[in-house]
Image: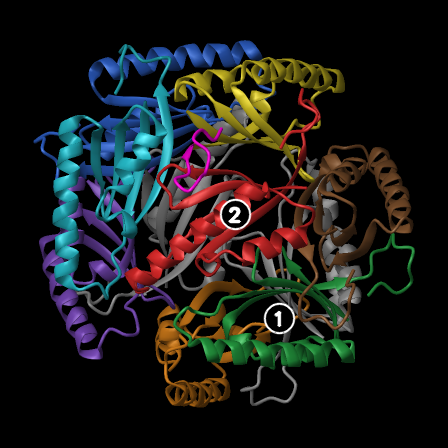
Chain colours: A purple, C blue, D cyan, E yellow, F red, G brown, I green, J orange
Amino acid sequence: MLFHVRMDVCIPHDVPAETAMKLKADEKTRFQQLQRSGQWRHIWRIVGQYSNVSVFDVASGSELHDLLLSLPLFPYMEITVMPLCRHPSSLHDDDR
Amino acid sequence: MLFHVRMDVCIPHDVPAETAMKLKADEKTRFQQLQRSGQWRHIWRIVGQYSNVSVFDVASGSELHDLLLSLPLFPYMEITVMPLCRHPSSLHDDDR
Amino acid sequence: MLFHVRMDVCIPHDVPAETAMKLKADEKTRFQQLQRSGQWRHIWRIVGQYSNVSVFDVASGSELHDLLLSLPLFPYMEITVMPLCRHPSSLHDDDR
Amino acid sequence: MLFHVRMDVCIPHDVPAETAMKLKADEKTRFQQLQRSGQWRHIWRIVGQYSNVSVFDVASGSELHDLLLSLPLFPYMEITVMPLCRHPSSLHDDDR
Amino acid sequence: MLFHVRMDVCIPHDVPAETAMKLKADEKTRFQQLQRSGQWRHIWRIVGQYSNVSVFDVASGSELHDLLLSLPLFPYMEITVMPLCRHPSSLHDDDR
Amino acid sequence: MLFHVRMDVCIPHDVPAETAMKLKADEKTRFQQLQRSGQWRHIWRIVGQYSNVSVFDVASGSELHDLLLSLPLFPYMEITVMPLCRHPSSLHDDDR
Amino acid sequence: MLFHVRMDVCIPHDVPAETAMKLKADEKTRFQQLQRSGQWRHIWRIVGQYSNVSVFDVASGSELHDLLLSLPLFPYMEITVMPLCRHPSSLHDDDR
Amino acid sequence: MLFHVRMDVCIPHDVPAETAMKLKADEKTRFQQLQRSGQWRHIWRIVGQYSNVSVFDVASGSELHDLLLSLPLFPYMEITVMPLCRHPSSLHDDDR
Amino acid sequence: MLFHVRMDVCIPHDVPAETAMKLKADEKTRFQQLQRSGQWRHIWRIVGQYSNVSVFDVASGSELHDLLLSLPLFPYMEITVMPLCRHPSSLHDDDR
Amino acid sequence: MLFHVRMDVCIPHDVPAETAMKLKADEKTRFQQLQRSGQWRHIWRIVGQYSNVSVFDVASGSELHDLLLSLPLFPYMEITVMPLCRHPSSLHDDDR
């Protein structure tokens, strides 16, 4: 199943710089695991924002929830989730 | 350049059924041209909505504007455009 | 998979009364099919609104999309979909 | 009487970790009392959010207000309440 | 049980004047029945709006829903419902 | 003159507990003075919120402003004011 | 008593031109009566909008409500009302 | 004086095609007059919208209001106006 | 030129009481200078809010910007500016 | 490519004054580099706000993203980006 996820990151300015840097490094590692596994199928930066637009390919909503909760930056992100499905006009059998 | 585009279609209920059907057929034809050319790179339905989320891959904002205006359903769509760029954490050199 | 769906119905006042009554009767029939099949698991009226809050239990987002599109009142409804999952504190193994 | 309640939890990042953990443990205990008593009839997680959607079955609005105020996380939650009633098309006599 | 209800009336300008006048007269009759029965406990005009703020005193949410649906202007009103309860600081035992 | 006032209380979590308790006790005392004088004519809790809906009966907007500013919790409340007037359909001469 | 009133006019494009012109002429006549009487104390156009910002000086909210209802364009206006009072820092005893 | 103006055009679908085309041609003529006079200093299309972002250079708010009202598409546009001034960091003496 | 300005003051609760009192005294002094000069032409309190609605009479947007920036409470205010002009129906030649 | 960018600056009041002054001086230096290079083509202050409206002329969305991230005040700004293109009615071949 495909989900469209937007993540807006906002780390409060009184979080110490090292803590923030550590969080971002851990986030990158976790992200790359999920990109390699194919669950985090697409990711793009939104121009001018500390935000991304992503597409996840997972077995269920529960699996997506567990993945998102496992992100080190989860406590500092506003997350918006929209379930997607194949578009009937598409020429491709399997748009992911 | 990549752009994230959301289209929400709303055909007023007093548009005659044949007109609406013709518009949708023309839209599908035009969409498939743009999908084949690679300019309309991704499309997904949003579950429960007469809406899509798409990613366009075009040379400029002007090219995108001309493509969107050429859509037969343009007068009946609310369109939201966000410029995208590559995410710095991505393992892929060229995320499109 | 579980989805939380809110439907706000708005039939324009210039739709003829018989057409509206027919639509509502068809909607009821279709709803009861889906309630019997277990896919439309819960439904409640929101007090004072021509709206419902529902929980669907389906195999995927695509199945939900097809069910919603099959509703006779679909063109006259604003629909909001939220994917749900089991709450970790629940005493029940299978909250549906 | 049935009420639809959405709770969005937001514990500020400067609340000490132990305090937060204690609050969550107490919340879980209180929740399970209310689930056992049948007053907190349904609960689901919203995918990707530290939020739940719930249905309460109580004698009155006052009873609901007292239950919600008794939750340890009450000061850290944004709560939205909608009164519900039986849907006239339902095949069941008693949808709860 | 007490409910706070706001009603914003909007009769489209192409409804014939006699139909509108008839609707308003019927609304007034129905309102006065409910005011006499004590179910429609308070009503005030909001200055400058074709709107009212009301307090209903009913046995349940279902009873309120049925009352609101019985209003002749229901199809032309946007209705907002909030359940109320006694304020703990009040000097009165029974604030209605 | 009648005014509809909604007050949403939000005491920041870093205000010391005793300060908060003192503020609430003072608020209650002041509220009861104004309830006795008849200026604070109605008050109700909104179910699930640390908020009230009230009706004030005062000589002018200036009098209301001075009353609201005199509330100990004023700095911690979001206040919304709507002027009210008698509803023309009411059976009562003097709805307050 | 002083009230701040914003009026946004929106005459639907299918109202016949003569009807609209008649409404506007009647509105102007009524406005000038109220300006002469001193009840409609200030009026300004908002640049680029078919809207005005006004200050009314009336005995009560009821008087304001009756004045606004008497405006020929009332059915085509969205009206926002805010009660005002004298600012404590003002050098003038009577700011109107 | 400089003003930032955004115009969102929305011609209802039941306006006859010739009327719409005539309106657009007249709008273009009027726009070019104002561009030549230097009053309509900048104009850009917003990608994907039937909207423009413009900068006007006029003697006063009144002059701007009269210009905007003189636009043939004025009745079909939502207009947002923001007054601008020179930015203190700019290297240019006269940013227009 | 006339501008409509709304100022909503919000001094964070951790600003020391003396600092806040000093800011308010300085604000009052500066306000009265501008009221005497005729640039701050009108000011009113909004009932129930720590906010004012004002009308400024200045030579340009730049002059207004400099005046607003010179206010001691500027860093603690949310400010909304709307350019105004004379209303064509007004009986007065010079509404300020 | 042209982009319309609005930046709203909000430096929290507990950032030390020297830090804030240093940030603003660095921001000014960086801005002037980009103004000289022609990438930051237009900038205006919005009257009454600590905000600017700007037009950037860059090769791509990625270039814009990198420029915005390089701004010393980036962590304290809310940024809104809209892609622009030439307006078809413009008399100029190259509106920048």
Secondary structure at numbered mark 2: helix
Q: Position of residue C80 (x, y in %)?
A: 37, 36
Across and down, in percent, residue E4 comes to: 49, 32
Residue bearing the label numbered 1: J93
Q: Nearer the viewer, mark 2 or mark 1?
A: 2
Looking at the image, residue F9 sits to the left or right of residue D36; the answer is right
Q: Relative to E11, is E88 on the left or the right?
A: left
Please tell me whether the stretch drawn in magenta is mainly helix, strand or loop: loop
Q: Which mark is residue F33?
A: 2
Rendered view: G49 above or below D60: below
Q: Is residue D34 left or right of residue D82?
A: left
The magenta region covers: E84-96
Question: Does the magenta portion include D3?
Answer: no
> Can you see residue J3?
no
Chain under callout 2: F
Does E87 lie within the magenta span? yes
Q: Which is more toward the observer, E73 or F92?
A: F92
> Marks 1 and 2: in contact by CB < 8 Å?
no
Q: Quadrant of residue E91?
A: top left
Which amino acid lies under the numbered mark 1 shown in the image of this protein? Answer: Asp
Are the numbered discs 2 and 1 placed on the same chain, yes or no? no
Q: Mark 1, chain letter?
A: J
Q: Position of residue G26 (x, y in %)?
A: 88, 39
